[in-house]
Image (spheres, grey):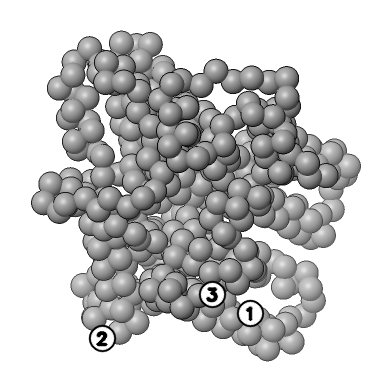
Amino acid sequence: MVLAVQLVSNLIVTDHKPDVFRMPMPPQEYTKGPVPWLDKLVVGCLSGLRHWDGEYFLHIANNLYTYENTLAFYPLYPTIVRYLAMACQSLYVPLSLQSLTLLVAVVLNVWLFCEAANLLYQLTQRIFNDLNKSWNAALIFCFNPASIFFTATYSESSFAYASFFLMLECVRPNQQFNYLRIFASLTACILCRSNGLITLGFPLYFFVRHILLTTNAKRCQQIVKMSLSLLMPLVILHAYYFYIYRLFCLPSVKVNHPKHVKDYASERNYLLAGQGPEASPWCQYTLPFPYNYVQSNYWDVGFLRYYQWKQVPNFLLALPMLFFMHLHCCEYLWVLAIKHLPQAVSWRELLKTHKAIPFVLHGAFLTIVCALFVHVQVSTRLLASATPIFYWFAADHMPKSLAQLKLRTKAGALFVWCTTYCAFGTVLFCNNYPWT
């Protein structure tokens, strides 16, 4: 549906042209594949899905990390897109590399989105053992308020897939951990998004829970395996940081950039890789991690920095998601503290019966971060891709069948919110207008 709406809206609505980053393109002779009309068809059908941050991801997929401001975007999704496109090109797919990266990026996201919906269904069923709730949670995910970002060239689909996969592995029956899968999915989370680092809490929590609730002769072996599963993704993350440090901070490293990349850097006053440590202040930090510096310097991200009168429209745009999450997280934790904690026979019983506690704490933390630190309009897509509790709380309001849905109910309000944001978001985003 999103693909159809973006195609129609792209044809009938004139694109807005904001002064934002656009991926610099090589000379025209390098952007034509063996069959030029196929390139035009791909670009014509999918160009509405590449706007805003999607331009950065496509630029990284085509050129890797050439500008300092691209360091705000983590490498997993664009790297996969890059090498899948190159593989297709080696198989003589008759498209230019630029068209292939766009096509691969969209197709990959659509596939991962479908897989993430399936994982969410399995995760919900494993936590609650409720088929109706599991179905409704997956259904709401498919029409969530940030749907356009799960199809566009963003990392939302890949992050949702990796996160739900990791969470599902953590709640396996009898806590029979597959350490290799935990390692792989945690690595994917950490390399996909900056907030992927806090997903490390899920395997840590459920492993400690397992240790406390069971007795096992092979406990030392389990601790070693889980420790390696948690530490190795951090080693890989720091290998990525070293790669970035080498590109931007080591004076001996010189990078040969294509002419169109250098021309765009001159036009926009961007800092290119290979300029040495003097050009990048973060190179002088004790821990030279670029992410916080880039977010602060290029996007003015920081504590309460977005609290300005001119940002009121963006706060209104994020209000439904932030209000929904704050309300339901507080309600859950209040009931847990007032009702379930006093009634619990022991802390062991509490750990056994309330598997959703770490998910709610994770979602509540992300909601607070969205409200106080980030560009608030991204709250909808950030929370929709990072935590399953939005879908669990929403599913609690849904009737047993869609035939029983009434607009003048909480379920009806939820339906209107999701469908409105899904439709309007697709039209606005695909024509380069600001959205969440």
Q: Horizontally, is 363 left or right of 262 in the view? A: right
Counting from the top left corner in percent of width and height, residue 376 is at 49, 67
Q: Image point 53% across, 69% down: which residue?
A: 306
Counting from the top left corner in percent of width and height, residue 404 is at 24, 77
Q: Are marks 3 and 2 in contact (CB under 8 Å)?
A: no
Is label 2 in a helix, a strand or a loop?
loop
The amino acid type of the residue labelled 1 equals Leu
Residue occupied by mark 3: 307
Residue occupied by mark 2: 408
Q: Earlier in the sequence, mark 3 or mark 2?
A: 3
Of the two numbered discs 1 and 3 in the rendering, the one whose residue sits closer to the viewer: 3
**Label 1: few (<14), some or many (≥20) within 10 Å?**
some
Is label 1 in a helix, a strand or a loop?
helix
**Label 3: few (<14), some or many (≥20) within 10 Å?**
some
Q: Is residue 436 visible?
A: yes
Indicate whether 211 appears above or below 55: below
Indicate whether 193 appears above or below 64: below
Which residue in the rendered view is the most extreme toward the left? 12
How many angstroms separate mark 1 from mark 2 (CA)? 28 Å
| Foreground of the two, 234 or 305 | 305
Q: Could you say which quadrant of the image residue 373 lies in?
A: bottom right
